[in-house]
Image (tube, rainbow, N blue to C red):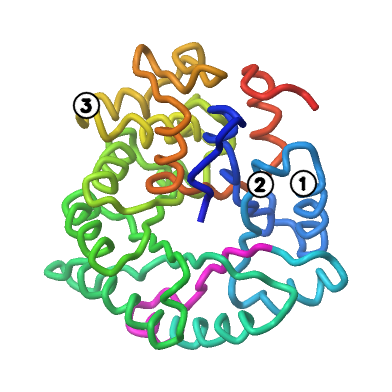
Amino acid sequence: APMTTFTGVGPARAALSALVDYAGLFPPAALGMADAVAEYDAARRGPYAWMLGRFIVPASRLAELEGTIAGRQRFSVSAIVDADPDPRRWFGAAQRRLTEIAGFRERDALRIETLEAALPRLLSARDTFDAPVGQFAGLLSRAGLHDLPAYVELPRDERWPALLAGAMAAAARSRLGVKIRCGGAEPSAYPSVAEVAAFVDAAATEHVPFKATAGLHHPIRHWNASAGTAMHGFLNLLAAAVFGHRLDLEAIEAIVAEEDAGAFSLGPRGFAWRGDEADEEEIALARAQDFVAYGSCSFDEPVEDLIALHILERA
C-alpha cells in the first residue's frame, strides 16, 4: 500500500509517489517480456523512480517474468487474474490462477503486492454484482491471498450505472478495491465523464480504494484525433479523488471534464483546482485510501507531460 506520510517531501511527491503502475506488456505498447522488464528496470533506476509503482503482469506469465528477471533485484508485481471470460467458466479458472499466484509468493524473485481481476459479465438481467464480488473474495480466502489488496473491474455495459452503487457496497463488505477502465481499442471503450465521475463518487461514498487503467497516457483530459475520442487525464482523476469527498456529483463531473491545464496546480503549497485546495496531508490520504495507482504502458510519457506542465523539474 502507498505510504501515508510524505513529510518534508512536498505535495507533488505526495500526489505522485508510486502513482504509475507499469503496464508495458499490454496494448498499445504490447512489448515483449524482455523489453518490458528492461524498461521497468531502467525506470526504477532513474530520477523519477519514486513515481513508479508495480510491474503489471498476467498471472499466466509470472513464470516467464521470473525467468526474465533472473539476477535482477526483486520486482514488485501486480498480478492480473487472467481467466476464461465466459461467466460459466470464469470462477473455476480464476481459482486455478489464484492457486498459481499463491505458489509464486513463496519464491524470491517476485514480490506480489496486489491482485487485479476483471469480473465476468452477468448472465441474467436479474443478477447484480453482489454474488460475483463475494464469490471472488471467497476465492481469495481459499487461496490464502486475502491479505493482498485486490481490485475488481466490473464489466461496463448498459446496466453498469444502475448497478454501480450496489457493486461498491459489495466491494466494501468484501474488503476489495475496484478498478475502472478509462480507454481501449475502440472509442466505445472510453467511459463518459458522467460514468467516471459516478465511479469516483460511489467509491468515495463506500470508502473503497480504486485503481484505473487504459487510456490515461496524459495528465489532462484532451481530444485525441487518432483515437477518435476525448481521453481522460490522470490528474483529473486524482483531483476528483482528492476533492470528491467535499464536492457534489456535478462538481466531480466538472473536474473529470476539465480540459484546461491552467485550472490545476500542484506545487509547494498544495494541489488546487479552480479555487479548491488540498494540503499535503489531504493528498496523501486520498492516495492511500482512494486513488491508489493507475496502469500505463509508458512511464516516460506521464513524466515528460508533468515536466511540460512544470509540476516536475527536469532531472
Which mark is first along the chain, 3 or 1? Answer: 1
Which mark is first along the chain, 2 or 3? Answer: 2
Between disc 1 and disc 3, the foreground one is 1
Query: Is 117 left, or right, of 202 in this rendering?
Result: right
Q: Which mark is residue 43?
A: 1
Q: Residue furthest right?
A: 71
Locate the C terminus by quadrant: top right
Q: Amino acid at mark 2?
A: Leu
Work out whether residue 215 or residue 263 is closer to the camera in this orientation and state it: 263
- Residue 231 sits above or below residue 273 on the image: below
Q: Which mark is residue 52?
A: 2
Which mark is first along the chain, 2 or 1? Answer: 1
Q: Residue at x 62, y 51 (%)?
A: 53
> Between marks 1 and 3, how big is the CA–CA gap?
38 Å
Task: Identify the magenta region.
Answer: 76-93
Q: Are the residues at dot 1 and dot 2 in contact (C-beta closer than 8 Å)?
A: yes
Tell me if residue 9 is in the magenta stretch.
no
Q: Residue furthest front?
A: 7
